[in-house]
Image: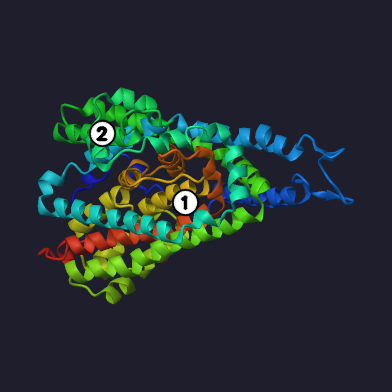
Amino acid sequence: MPSSTAPPAGSSTASRDATATPGGDPSARRILIGLLLGAVLGMVANVLLRPGAPVDGVAAWDLNGDRVHDGLDWFCQNVTTVIGRLFLRLMFMVVLPLVVSALALAVVEIGDVRKLGRIGLRTLLFSGILSASAVLLGLTLVNLIRPGDALSAEARQALVERNAAGSADVGQKASKAKSVRDIVIDMIPENPLQEMAGAIDGSSKGNGMLAVMFASLFLGAALAAKPAECRGVISFLEGLNSVAMTIIGWAMTLAPLGAGCLVFSIVATLGYEVLVTLAWFAVTVLLGLLLQLVVVYPLVLTLFSRVTPLAFFSKISEAMQVAFGTSSSNATLPTALRVAEQNLQLPRETARFVLTVGATGNQNGTALYEGVVVLFLAQVFGVELSLGQQVMVVLMSILAGIGTAGVPGGSLPLIVVLMRSVGVPGEGIGIIMGVDRILDMCRTVLNVTGDLVVATCVSGDAEEPATEHPA
C-alpha cells in the first residue's frame, strides 16, 4: 500500500487511548498524582470532617441539637466541584467539532475501500463484528454483575443530591425512553443543526449525538466519493480537528487539578463505599476485556484464519507488551506492523492498510469500556435504562471509538455525552477517574490485538506473500 493511504494527519491514527503510562510521560504522572491526592484527601476529609463526625463525643456539626452548616459539603459544592466542572466544560465545548471532523475524516481516510475491493470490505466487516461483540459483552457483564449496585441507598441519595442540577431530568428522560424502532428511524436526522444544538445536554428530540455521528459518517462518505472536488472541505475538517485536539490538549494540562477535585468531591461525599463500588467496576471491565481476548478472538481466528490461537498470541506477544507499556495504539503501530509482516508473515500491503485503519476504527477495548462506564454510572445514580437506550449506548460506543481516535483525553467528553444522552449526570465521570489509567493500559492491549486479529483474518485467503514486498 502506498504511503498516501495513511491518514493525512499523523496524529489521527492514534487510538483514543493514546495516553502514556505514568512511568513514561510527565503529564500522565501529574494526572496520576492529582488523582491519588484527590482520593487520599477526600478519604481523610470524609473520616474527619463528615457531618456528624464526633469531636470529644459531640457531633461536629451539631449545635443545640440542630444540624448547622456543613463546611465540607460547602467546600465540595463551591470549590472542588466548580473546578472539576470547569475542567469538563473546557472539553465539552469542542465535542461537536471533534466528533464531526474526526468521524468524517476517518471515512475519508479509508476511502480506498472501493479500490481495495474484498480486502477493504472484509476489514470493515471484521472490525464491525469485533467492536459490536466487545460492546455487547461488556453490557452483558455490567447487567449481570451490576457493579453500581454496590453503593448503598444512602450513599446513592447523597450522590444524587450533590449532583442535583445534573440529575434533574433523569426521571423525565427515563419516562421518554424510546423504542428500538424510533432509535433506528432517528439515526438519520431531519435537521442536523438542531441535533447538534441538543446533543451535549441531551435536550434533542431526536437521537442527539448518535444522529450527529451518523450525519458525520455520511459527510465523510460524500467527501471520500469526490476527494478532488472536495479538497477544500477536507482541509477545513483537518484544520478543525487539529484545533479541537489543541484545545483538548490545553484542557488536559489542567487535568491533575480538575480530575483531582472531581475525585476529592466524590470520595469526600461517599467515603470508602465509592472505593468498593469502583473495585467492582474495574473487575467488570477487566473481565470483559479478558473474555474478548481469550474467547472471542481465538474463536474468530479459528473460524477465519490459518493460524492457531496459541501460535498467534505467541507471535504477537511483543506488540501486546508494547501496547500495555505505552498505553498508546499509535506508539505501538510500528511494532505491530513489524510483528504482522515478520512474525505472522502477512502480506505487507494488507497488513499496513488494516493496521492503519484499525488504529482509527477498530477500537474493541475502547468500545467495551465506554459501554460499561455508561451503564455502571447509570446504576450508581439509580437510572434504569430501557432496551432502546441500551441499544443506543451500543451504537454510540462503537462510533465513539472512531470519533475520538488520536485525541489524548478525548474519550472523556464523549463518555460524558453518552451519559447525558441517557440521563446520567456528567459529573459522575469523576467516579471512574481513579482507575482509568490502569484500565487504559489494559484496553490498549485489546485494541492492538484486535487490529492484528482483523489483519490476520483478512489475510487468511490472501495469495500475496509478505516476502514479495521488501521493507
Q: Label 2, on which residue?
A: 186
Q: Amino acid at mark 2?
A: Asp
Q: Position of residue 413 (x, y in %)?
A: 45, 38
Q: Are marks 2 and 1 in contact (CB under 8 Å)?
A: no
Alpha carbons under labels 2 and 1: distance apart: 25 Å
- Residue placed furthest toward the front: 65
Q: Give whichever of 331, 170 is nearer the camera.
A: 170
Toward the right, the furthest residue is 56
Any part of residue 421 in sight:
no
Q: How crowded is the residue under tag 2: few (<14 C-alpha within 10 Å), some, or many (20+)?
A: some
Q: Which residue is mark 1?
A: 376
Q: How would you rate the neighbour count of disc 1 (Cα within 10 Å): few for under 14, some for 14-19, many for 20 or more?
A: many
Q: Secondary structure at mark 2?
A: loop
Q: Is residue 171 left or right of residue 311?
A: right
In the drawing, what numbered circle is on residue 81? Answer: none
Across and down, in percent, residue 87 comes to: 55, 35
- Please provide percent x and percent y for residue 35: 61, 49
Precedes in sequence: disc 2 or disc 1: 2
Q: Amino acid at mark 1?
A: Phe
**Residue pictured at 16% horizontal, 26% vertical:** 229
Task: Please provide percent x and percent y for residue 24.
Answer: 53, 55
- 391 or 138: nearer the viewer: 391
Residue 266 picture quarter:
top right
Give the tally of numbered discs.
Answer: 2
Find residue 467 and report its image quarter.
bottom left
Name the residue at 29% across, 54% down: 131
